[in-house]
Amino acid sequence: MKALVWLAKALVYTTGALVAAFFLVQAWFFAHVLYWDRFNPGATSVMDARLEALRAADPKAALKRDWVDYNRISVHLKRAVVAAEDAKFIDHEGFDWDGIQRALERNQQRGKVVAGGSTISQQLAKNLFLSGERSMVRKGQEALITLMLEKVMTKRRILELYLNVAEWGEGVFGAEAAARHYFGTSAANLTPAQAARLAAMLPRPRFYDRNRGSKYLAAYSERILARMPSAQLP
Protein backbone atom coordinates (compact mmCIF):
# COMPACT_ATOMS: atom_id res chain seq x y z
CA MET A 1 0.00 0.00 0.00
CA LYS A 2 2.79 2.43 0.89
CA ALA A 3 4.46 1.63 -2.43
CA LEU A 4 1.28 2.53 -4.30
CA VAL A 5 0.98 5.81 -2.43
CA TRP A 6 4.62 6.59 -3.19
CA LEU A 7 4.10 5.81 -6.89
CA ALA A 8 0.99 7.98 -7.00
CA LYS A 9 2.83 10.91 -5.41
CA ALA A 10 5.76 10.44 -7.78
CA LEU A 11 3.38 10.46 -10.75
CA VAL A 12 1.67 13.63 -9.51
CA TYR A 13 4.98 15.41 -8.91
CA THR A 14 6.38 14.33 -12.28
CA THR A 15 3.24 15.41 -14.11
CA GLY A 16 3.24 18.72 -12.28
CA ALA A 17 6.88 19.31 -13.14
CA LEU A 18 6.26 18.55 -16.82
CA VAL A 19 3.24 20.86 -16.96
CA ALA A 20 5.20 23.64 -15.26
CA ALA A 21 8.10 23.16 -17.68
CA PHE A 22 5.72 23.27 -20.64
CA PHE A 23 4.19 26.57 -19.55
CA LEU A 24 7.61 28.07 -18.82
CA VAL A 25 8.75 27.21 -22.33
CA GLN A 26 5.60 28.73 -23.84
CA ALA A 27 6.09 31.85 -21.72
CA TRP A 28 9.63 32.15 -23.10
CA PHE A 29 8.33 31.94 -26.67
CA PHE A 30 5.52 34.39 -25.97
CA ALA A 31 7.89 36.92 -24.40
CA HIS A 32 10.01 36.85 -27.56
CA VAL A 33 6.94 37.27 -29.75
CA LEU A 34 5.92 40.34 -27.73
CA TYR A 35 9.43 41.77 -27.99
CA TRP A 36 9.73 41.14 -31.73
CA ASP A 37 6.39 42.78 -32.34
CA ARG A 38 8.16 46.07 -31.57
CA PHE A 39 11.84 45.34 -32.12
CA ASN A 40 13.64 43.63 -34.98
CA PRO A 41 15.24 40.25 -34.25
CA GLY A 42 18.92 39.55 -34.63
CA ALA A 43 19.87 36.01 -35.60
CA THR A 44 17.11 33.41 -35.79
CA SER A 45 17.21 29.70 -35.06
CA VAL A 46 17.62 28.86 -38.75
CA MET A 47 20.36 31.47 -39.18
CA ASP A 48 22.28 30.05 -36.22
CA ALA A 49 22.05 26.53 -37.65
CA ARG A 50 23.21 27.63 -41.12
CA LEU A 51 26.10 29.66 -39.73
CA GLU A 52 27.25 26.73 -37.64
CA ALA A 53 27.23 24.50 -40.73
CA LEU A 54 29.12 27.06 -42.81
CA ARG A 55 31.75 27.57 -40.14
CA ALA A 56 32.36 23.84 -39.92
CA ALA A 57 33.90 24.20 -43.39
CA ASP A 58 35.16 27.79 -43.07
CA PRO A 59 35.66 29.27 -39.56
CA LYS A 60 35.50 32.77 -41.04
CA ALA A 61 32.16 32.26 -42.79
CA ALA A 62 29.49 34.91 -42.26
CA LEU A 63 25.86 35.31 -43.23
CA LYS A 64 24.61 37.86 -45.74
CA ARG A 65 21.70 39.71 -44.16
CA ASP A 66 20.54 43.33 -43.86
CA TRP A 67 17.29 44.40 -42.27
CA VAL A 68 15.04 46.57 -44.41
CA ASP A 69 11.74 48.09 -43.28
CA TYR A 70 8.44 47.06 -44.85
CA ASN A 71 8.10 50.26 -46.87
CA ARG A 72 11.54 49.73 -48.39
CA ILE A 73 10.69 46.32 -49.82
CA SER A 74 9.33 46.23 -53.36
CA VAL A 75 5.58 45.72 -53.55
CA HIS A 76 6.35 43.24 -56.31
CA LEU A 77 8.25 40.99 -53.89
CA LYS A 78 5.46 41.20 -51.33
CA ARG A 79 2.91 40.18 -53.95
CA ALA A 80 5.16 37.44 -55.31
CA VAL A 81 5.77 35.88 -51.90
CA VAL A 82 2.09 35.97 -50.93
CA ALA A 83 1.07 34.57 -54.32
CA ALA A 84 3.62 31.76 -54.08
CA GLU A 85 3.55 30.89 -50.39
CA ASP A 86 0.20 31.86 -48.90
CA ALA A 87 -2.55 33.22 -51.16
CA LYS A 88 -5.00 33.45 -48.22
CA PHE A 89 -2.51 35.23 -45.97
CA ILE A 90 -4.66 38.23 -45.04
CA ASP A 91 -7.78 36.13 -44.46
CA HIS A 92 -6.69 33.18 -42.31
CA GLU A 93 -5.71 33.20 -38.64
CA GLY A 94 -2.45 31.34 -39.07
CA PHE A 95 -3.53 28.13 -40.80
CA ASP A 96 -4.83 27.46 -44.31
CA TRP A 97 -6.89 24.32 -43.69
CA ASP A 98 -7.75 23.88 -47.37
CA GLY A 99 -4.07 24.13 -48.23
CA ILE A 100 -3.15 21.60 -45.56
CA GLN A 101 -5.77 19.18 -46.92
CA ARG A 102 -4.45 19.56 -50.46
CA ALA A 103 -0.89 18.99 -49.24
CA LEU A 104 -1.94 15.82 -47.41
CA GLU A 105 -3.66 14.50 -50.53
CA ARG A 106 -0.60 15.20 -52.70
CA ASN A 107 1.69 13.53 -50.18
CA GLN A 108 -0.57 10.45 -50.07
CA GLN A 109 -0.63 10.26 -53.87
CA ARG A 110 3.18 10.47 -54.12
CA GLY A 111 3.84 8.26 -51.11
CA LYS A 112 6.23 10.83 -49.64
CA VAL A 113 6.27 14.41 -48.39
CA VAL A 114 6.22 16.70 -51.43
CA ALA A 115 4.06 19.52 -50.05
CA GLY A 116 3.66 21.09 -46.64
CA GLY A 117 0.78 23.53 -46.80
CA SER A 118 2.48 25.88 -44.32
CA THR A 119 1.36 29.48 -44.19
CA ILE A 120 3.71 32.47 -43.99
CA SER A 121 2.91 32.68 -40.27
CA GLN A 122 3.86 29.03 -39.74
CA GLN A 123 7.06 29.46 -41.71
CA LEU A 124 7.95 32.52 -39.66
CA ALA A 125 7.39 30.56 -36.43
CA LYS A 126 9.78 27.86 -37.66
CA ASN A 127 12.40 30.31 -38.92
CA LEU A 128 12.46 32.34 -35.73
CA PHE A 129 12.52 29.58 -33.15
CA LEU A 130 12.72 26.00 -34.38
CA SER A 131 15.03 23.45 -35.95
CA GLY A 132 14.49 21.73 -39.29
CA GLU A 133 13.61 18.36 -37.78
CA ARG A 134 10.28 16.76 -38.68
CA SER A 135 8.32 15.49 -35.69
CA MET A 136 4.87 15.80 -34.20
CA VAL A 137 6.29 17.61 -31.16
CA ARG A 138 7.98 20.20 -33.35
CA LYS A 139 4.87 20.67 -35.48
CA GLY A 140 2.81 21.11 -32.32
CA GLN A 141 5.19 23.76 -31.04
CA GLU A 142 5.14 25.46 -34.42
CA ALA A 143 1.35 25.63 -34.24
CA LEU A 144 1.41 27.21 -30.77
CA ILE A 145 3.97 29.83 -31.84
CA THR A 146 1.91 30.53 -34.96
CA LEU A 147 -1.12 31.28 -32.77
CA MET A 148 1.01 33.62 -30.65
CA LEU A 149 2.25 35.48 -33.73
CA GLU A 150 -1.25 35.88 -35.11
CA LYS A 151 -2.69 37.12 -31.80
CA VAL A 152 0.09 39.59 -31.04
CA MET A 153 1.21 40.89 -34.43
CA THR A 154 -0.48 42.50 -37.40
CA LYS A 155 -0.31 40.76 -40.76
CA ARG A 156 1.93 43.56 -41.97
CA ARG A 157 4.43 42.92 -39.18
CA ILE A 158 4.36 39.16 -39.79
CA LEU A 159 5.10 39.70 -43.48
CA GLU A 160 7.82 42.24 -42.70
CA LEU A 161 9.54 39.80 -40.36
CA TYR A 162 9.20 36.92 -42.79
CA LEU A 163 10.70 38.87 -45.69
CA ASN A 164 13.67 39.80 -43.51
CA VAL A 165 14.46 36.38 -42.04
CA ALA A 166 13.58 34.01 -44.91
CA GLU A 167 16.47 31.97 -46.30
CA TRP A 168 17.27 32.76 -49.93
CA GLY A 169 20.51 30.93 -50.59
CA GLU A 170 23.68 29.60 -49.03
CA GLY A 171 24.13 31.98 -46.11
CA VAL A 172 21.72 34.51 -47.67
CA PHE A 173 18.85 35.73 -45.48
CA GLY A 174 16.25 38.41 -46.06
CA ALA A 175 14.99 40.36 -49.05
CA GLU A 176 17.78 42.94 -49.13
CA ALA A 177 20.60 40.40 -49.10
CA ALA A 178 18.76 38.27 -51.67
CA ALA A 179 18.21 41.19 -54.05
CA ARG A 180 21.89 42.12 -53.90
CA HIS A 181 23.11 38.50 -54.08
CA TYR A 182 21.15 37.59 -57.21
CA PHE A 183 20.48 40.87 -59.03
CA GLY A 184 22.91 43.47 -57.65
CA THR A 185 20.07 45.77 -56.64
CA SER A 186 18.14 46.69 -53.49
CA ALA A 187 14.96 45.07 -52.20
CA ALA A 188 13.16 48.33 -52.99
CA ASN A 189 14.08 48.21 -56.69
CA LEU A 190 13.20 44.62 -57.57
CA THR A 191 11.23 44.26 -60.80
CA PRO A 192 8.16 42.00 -61.02
CA ALA A 193 10.16 39.30 -62.82
CA GLN A 194 12.99 39.43 -60.29
CA ALA A 195 10.52 39.29 -57.42
CA ALA A 196 8.75 36.28 -58.92
CA ARG A 197 12.06 34.47 -59.28
CA LEU A 198 13.01 35.11 -55.66
CA ALA A 199 9.61 33.86 -54.49
CA ALA A 200 10.02 30.73 -56.61
CA MET A 201 13.29 29.96 -54.83
CA LEU A 202 11.83 29.92 -51.31
CA PRO A 203 10.97 26.19 -51.09
CA ARG A 204 14.58 25.17 -51.91
CA PRO A 205 16.76 28.30 -51.67
CA ARG A 206 20.18 26.69 -51.32
CA PHE A 207 19.47 24.25 -54.15
CA TYR A 208 18.40 27.03 -56.49
CA ASP A 209 21.36 29.17 -55.45
CA ARG A 210 23.52 26.38 -56.90
CA ASN A 211 21.18 25.65 -59.84
CA ARG A 212 20.10 29.04 -61.11
CA GLY A 213 19.51 27.73 -64.63
CA SER A 214 16.83 25.28 -63.48
CA LYS A 215 14.03 24.96 -66.05
CA TYR A 216 11.54 24.25 -63.28
CA LEU A 217 12.58 27.44 -61.47
CA ALA A 218 12.07 29.48 -64.64
CA ALA A 219 8.64 27.94 -65.29
CA TYR A 220 7.52 28.33 -61.68
CA SER A 221 8.66 31.97 -61.71
CA GLU A 222 6.40 32.61 -64.72
CA ARG A 223 3.42 31.05 -62.93
CA ILE A 224 4.01 33.24 -59.89
CA LEU A 225 4.36 36.32 -62.09
CA ALA A 226 0.94 35.60 -63.59
CA ARG A 227 -0.66 35.28 -60.13
CA MET A 228 0.95 38.36 -58.57
CA PRO A 229 -1.70 40.94 -59.64
CA SER A 230 -4.36 39.10 -57.60
CA ALA A 231 -2.25 38.80 -54.43
CA GLN A 232 -3.73 40.75 -51.51
CA LEU A 233 -1.37 42.55 -49.15
CA PRO A 234 -1.81 43.83 -45.58
Image: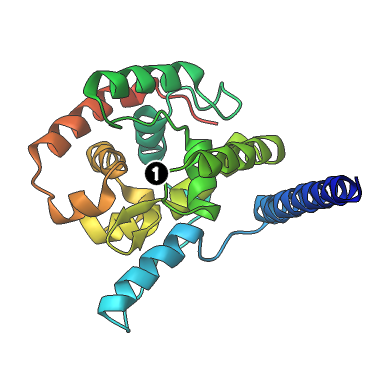
Residue tagged by mark 1? 74
- Tell me the quadrant of the picture where the N terminus can be found: top right
Between 87 and 67, the one nearer to me in the picture: 87
Image coords of residue 224 (percent x, y): 27, 28
Q: Is residue 13 left or right of residue 204?
A: right
- The residue shown at (65%, 58%) is 39
Residue located 19% across and 49% down the image: 208
In this image, 175 relative to 157: left or right?
A: left
| Circle 1: element type | loop
- Residue at 42% in and 49% down: 133
- Specify whether residue 37 is in view: yes
Give the answer, above or below, for where 45 lies relative to 222: below
Q: Is residue 184 visible?
A: no
Q: Nearer the viewer, residue 212 or 110?
A: 110
Give x and y (percent) for residue 70.
Answer: 51, 47
Which of these two is toward me, 226 or 30?
Answer: 30
Q: Quadrant of the C terminus?
A: top right
Residue 74 against residue 228 in the figure, above or below: below
